[in-house]
């Protein structure tokens, strides 16, 4: 998958506690998206069990509200 990190981050203003690890590792450290949650975020299958400030887990699903993760899904379908 070819992507442009500058395009993904364009207009996004926030501090990432993981230092944009998702963009720096060839998209290997991202949760798989199962669909979009309106304008708010995306439904995901969490990749790790650790803490993420943008991940909200529920018994049958999880929602990610990270603006970078949502942008990756909208621009590149990943």
Image: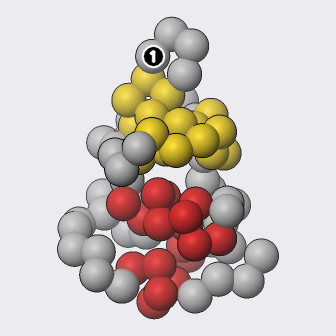
Colouring method of the image: secondary structure
10 left or right of 76?
Answer: left
- Residue that sits furthest to the right in the current view: 1
Please tell me which residue lies in front, 16 or 66.
66
Residue 68, image x and y in percent? 42, 65
Picture quadrant where residue 13 is located: bottom left
- How many discs mark residues in the rendered view? 1
Name the residue rendered at 40%, 37% in the picture: 55
78 left or right of 43?
Answer: right
- Dot 1 alpha-carbon crowd within 10 angstroms: few under 14, some 14 to 19, many 20 or more: few
59 left or right of 56?
Answer: right
The residue indicated by pointer 1 is 58
- Residue that sits furthest to the front in the current view: 38
Picture quadrant where residue 28 is located: bottom right
Residue 59 seen by the camera? yes
The correct choice, above or below, for 72 with respect to 61 in the image is below
Q: Quadrant of the N terminus?
A: bottom right
43 left or right of 51?
Answer: right
Q: Secondary structure at mark 1?
A: loop
Name the residue rendered at 47%, 57% in the picture: 70
Residue 21 seen by the camera? no
Name the residue rendered at 34%, 46% in the picture: 40
Q: Quadrant of the C terminus?
A: bottom right
The correct choice, above or below, for 37 with respect to 8 in the image is above
Residue 46, image x and y in percent? 58, 35
Residue 63, image x and y in percent? 45, 34
The correct choice, above or below, for 52 with respect to 62 in the image is below
Residue 21, image x and y in percent? 50, 66
């Amino acid at each position: 998958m070819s992507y442009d990190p500058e395009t993904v981050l364009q207009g996004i203003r926030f501090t990432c506690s993981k230092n944009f690890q998702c963009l720096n590792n060839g998209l290997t450290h991202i949760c798989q998206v199962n669909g979009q949650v309106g304008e708010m975020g995306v439904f995901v299958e969490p990749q790790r069990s650790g803490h993420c400030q943008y991940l909200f887990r529920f018994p049958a699903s999880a929602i990610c509200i990270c603006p970078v993760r949502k942008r990756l899904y909208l621009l590149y379908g990943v």
